[in-house]
Amino acid sequence: MRLPSVNRPPSTASVTLMIQHGVRVRAWCDTCQGKYREVDLAQVVAAKGPDFDLWGKSTRCRLTPGCEGRNRFYHNARGYFCPLR
């Protein structure tokens, strides 16, 4: 079981809570530095389930074809976008 982060906004504990609280999520690649892309949280729920937690997660780059980098996720639960980690 993962320990909660002291600075973690409670509304980021699951994708469902993010949707309920109007938290937006964006993806950005640490390699190609492609333009930020909005994440469709409803699609995340459909693929991973309502309790899925994006905190500390990354995925292979989907912003630029052929990029080998990792997409990191950013949330705006504090009123500005900051990393989900």
Image: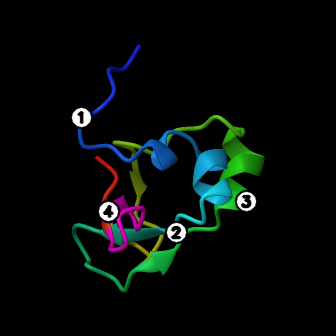
Q: Earlier in the sequence, mark 2 or mark 3?
A: 2
40 to 15, vertically: above or below: below
Q: Earlier in the sequence, mark 3 or mark 4?
A: 3
Q: Nearer the viewer, mark 4 or mark 2?
A: 2
Q: Nearer the viewer, mark 4 or mark 1?
A: 1
Q: Amino acid at mark 4?
A: Glu
Q: Amino acid at mark 2?
A: Arg
| Circle 3 SS class | helix
| Circle 4 SS class | loop
Q: Nearer the viewer, residue 6 or 36?
A: 6
- Label 1 Cα crowd, 10 Å radius (few <14 / some 14-19 / many 20+): few
- Label 4 Cα crowd, 10 Å radius (few <14 / some 14-19 / many 20+): some
> Where residue 60 appears, x then y in whole percent?
41, 56
Identify the mark at residue 44; answer none if there is no mark. none
Q: Nearer the viewer, mark 2 or mark 1?
A: 1
Residue 36 is drawn in which quadrant?
bottom left
Return the residue at label 4.
68
Return the residue at label 3.
42
Q: Earlier in the sequence, mark 4 or mark 2?
A: 2
Q: Is residue 76 left or right of residue 40?
A: left
33 to 26, vertically: above or below: below
Q: Nearer the viewer, mark 3 or mark 4?
A: 3
> Where residue 71 appears, x then y in whole percent?
37, 61
Q: Which residues are magenta?
A: 68-81
Identify the mark at residue 24; answer none if there is no mark. 2
